[in-house]
């Protein structure tokens, strides 16, 4: 499955993001590694730029945004509030996008490796999503910011430069295209296919006709993305597995779905393609394997250093007279740099001597040739000792991997408990009616406010139980809902009110039009947080039993556990249980129900009514 943007994807997305240029940043939101930038655009209204650090960047509306921003989002809000976007650019052909603002700041999206998002002013980082240290640069607030060394940009190459670069890089054609030309495996194979070239071919002659055909195929792809993009989502068994900015020949026989923009295709993909998360055991094993790779590399380096130190010591003895004279002249101060003398460090009393084209050796002129050779032998001995310790560490790590594998095998034998797909409406209480309407309700005063302020639109219906402290509920598109949905929504509002914890057998609720709901109190009155004023006629449903059902349903191809009115579950679920106020604790029953459905405990606990329960009836479900 696709797990991030390619350089060609970045090229296409950057073109679509140009609609934000001239707009002003309204708000920045963050949920873990997801960032959402709400931008007031010049054409009116607003658009949202979505980013998942190191993976994705596109225009995508996110309906349920987190209320409280983490520190990084707070920093972005502080620096970018009402800042005007001056430019959005891809850096070369890299997976790096820079958003420049009128205040002289830049937001850099690095979409490779673990990824990063860095706010830069001048040459200094003001804020960074994560601190990072690399061989050639360090990223962190208050530190100088520099881009990573640029990779190859085949789109800027002439035909001759492309051919020269391709032949200079050794390896199969597809590998050179993928790695050497920064195209990735997907487009490396696509170019081979379009050029009619065997992807395993090794080409050494710049005049080879296959290189010319590959160059033409590369330019053809780039031109199509720039001038006539036709984004597609590639499907397998109805599930999305890839997203491309243009149709690719290698997917000609696959199931595909077209979209007007790459951003819309990516939004569709991200909403439906959820890779299996690695288990803790898999994460631990991968970490240990990476540790072994680093330890093995260290052993190789130490052994190489030992061999080199010994060789240099023997070299000194083999040319004893030359080095004895060199040390004497260095001690007397008559030695000058040049030729085999690479450098002279008077503070350390060291002369650096070139031995061949690559190797150099430092000689201490306060010691004679024998003593300098002895230092090299000691360096060899120390390197070999470190290598032995590293080998022992590798053995320890291997034993830890074996223990991890045994633990993973034990876990694998246990019944699988998988989290189901998470949807935006799960931030609230929710259910789907027998007629297919989504009904959402608040969990507390804060989400009651959000339900009305963010989600109650024209054409919706507002529902509330006739009990103090009941949740505010909204029937989405409720203007077309029938009596069944209206009654079920009222039963839902009643069941999640204090009627349940009070053990009431029945109660009443009402529904009204969206424009009858207001936060504006009458003169001299006060409306508390989570409460609203209802004006006009209330449409009551009386004498409803206080009970709910919980069962499995399917939504957009995903299994979900839903709690709602009995009628709604009976219409949509084959396995469900009917509950009434009772004596069993919510926590104890949630554990039994989670085991029966094979889902994590928190998924069930979040949807149960607020109080003790009693099982009135179970349908094809063993508890």
Image (spheres, grey):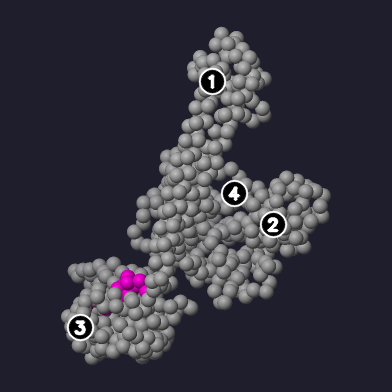
Q: Secondary structure at mark 2?
A: helix
The magenta-colored residue range is: 599-611
Towards the viewer: 488 or 157: 157
Q: Secondary structure at mark 3?
A: strand
Distance from the alpha carbon under mark 2 to that under mark 4:
24 Å
Which tag is nearer the camera, tag 1 or tag 4? 1
Q: Is residue 561 magenta?
A: no
Compared with 191, 133 (above or below) is above
Q: Main secondary structure of the magenta part?
A: loop
> Mark 3 = which residue?
582
The disc label shown at residue 372, or none = 1
Residue at image x 36%, y 51%? 71
Residue at image x 40%, y 87%? 574
Q: Quadrant of the N terminus?
A: bottom right
Which tag is nearer the camera, tag 1 or tag 3? 1
Which tag is nearer the camera, tag 2 or tag 3? 2
Distance from the alpha carbon under mark 4 to that under mark 3:
63 Å
> Mark 2 = which residue?
174
> Which of the marked residues, 1 or 3, is nearer the chain's N terminus?
1
Towards the viewer: 566 or 618: 618
Q: Position of residue 328 (x, y in %)?
A: 58, 11
Q: Position of residue 444 (x, y in %)?
A: 27, 70
């Amino acid at each position: 499955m696709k797990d991030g943007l390619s350089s060609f994807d970045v090229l296409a997305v950057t073109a679509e993001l140009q609609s934000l240029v001239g707009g002003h940043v309204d708000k920045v939101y963050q949920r873990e590694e997801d960032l959402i930038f709400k931008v007031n655009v010049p054409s009116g209204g607003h658009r949202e730029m979505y980013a998942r650090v190191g993976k994705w960047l596109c225009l995508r509306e996110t309906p349920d945004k987190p209320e409280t921003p983490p520190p990084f989002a707070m920093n972005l809000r502080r620096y970018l509030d009402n800042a005007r976007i001056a430019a959005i650019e891809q850096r070369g052909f890299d997976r790096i996008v820079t958003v420049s603002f009128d205040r002289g700041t830049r937001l850099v999206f690095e979409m490779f490796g673990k990824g990063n998002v860095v706010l830069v002013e001048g040459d200094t980082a003001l804020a960074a999503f994560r601190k990072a240290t690399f061989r050639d640069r360090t990223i962190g607030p208050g530190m100088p910011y520099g881009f990573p060394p640029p990779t190859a940009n085949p789109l800027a190459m002439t035909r001759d430069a492309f051919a020269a670069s391709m032949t200079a890089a050794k390896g199969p054609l597809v590998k050179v295209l993928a790695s050497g030309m920064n195209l990735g495996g997907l487009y490396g194979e696509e170019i081979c296919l379009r050029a009619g070239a065997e992807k395993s071919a090794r080409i050494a002659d710049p005049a080879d006709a296959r290189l010319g055909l590959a160059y033409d195929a590369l330019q053809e792809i780039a031109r199509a993305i720039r001038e006539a993009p036709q984004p597609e989502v590639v499907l397998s068994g109805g599930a999305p597995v890839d997203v491309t900015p243009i149709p690719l020949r290698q997917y000609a026989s696959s199931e595909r779905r077209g979209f007007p923009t790459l951003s819309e295709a990516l939004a569709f993909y991200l909403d439906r393609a959820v890779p299996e998360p690695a288990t803790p055991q898999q994460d631990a094993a991968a970490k240990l394997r990476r540790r072994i790779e680093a330890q093995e590399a260290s052993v190789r380096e130490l052994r190489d250093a030992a061999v080199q130190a010994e060789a240099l010591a023997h070299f000194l003895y083999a040319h004893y007279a030359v080095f004895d004279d060199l040390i004497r002249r260095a001690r007397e101060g008559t030695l000058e740099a040049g030729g085999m003398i690479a450098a002279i460090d008077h503070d350390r009393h060291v002369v650096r001597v070139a031995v061949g084209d690559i190797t150099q050796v430092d000689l201490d002129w306060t010691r004679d040739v024998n003593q300098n050779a002895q230092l090299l032998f000691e360096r060899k001995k120390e390197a070999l000792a470190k290598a032995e310790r590293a080998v022992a560490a590798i053995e320890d790590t291997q034993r830890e991997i074996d223990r991890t594998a045994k633990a993973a095998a034990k876990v694998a034998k246990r019944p699988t408990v998988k989290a189901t797909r998470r949807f935006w409406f799960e931030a609230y209480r929710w259910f789907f009616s027998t007629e297919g309407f989504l009904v959402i309700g608040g969990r507390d005063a804060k989400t009651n406010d959000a339900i009305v302020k963010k989600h109650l639109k024209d054409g919706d219906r507002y529902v509330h139980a006739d009990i103090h402290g009941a949740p505010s509920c909204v029937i989405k598109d409720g203007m077309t809902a029938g009596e069944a949905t209206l009654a079920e929504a009222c039963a839902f509002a009643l069941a999640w009110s204090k009627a349940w914890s009070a053990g009431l057998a029945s109660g009443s609720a009402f529904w009204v039009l969206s424009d009858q709901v207001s936060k504006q109190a009458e003169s001299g009155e006060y409306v508390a947080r989570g409460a609203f004023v209802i004006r006009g006629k209330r449409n009551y449903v009386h004498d409803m039993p206080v009970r709910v059902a919980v069962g499995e349903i399917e939504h957009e191809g995903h299994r979900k556990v839903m709690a709602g009115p009995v009628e709604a579950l009976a219409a949509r679920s084959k396995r469900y249980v009917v509950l009434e106020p009772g004596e069993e604790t919510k926590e104890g029953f949630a554990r039994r129900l989670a085991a029966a459905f094979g889902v994590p405990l928190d998924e069930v606990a979040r949807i149960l009514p607020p109080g003790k329960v009693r099982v009135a009836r179970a349908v094809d479900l063993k508890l």
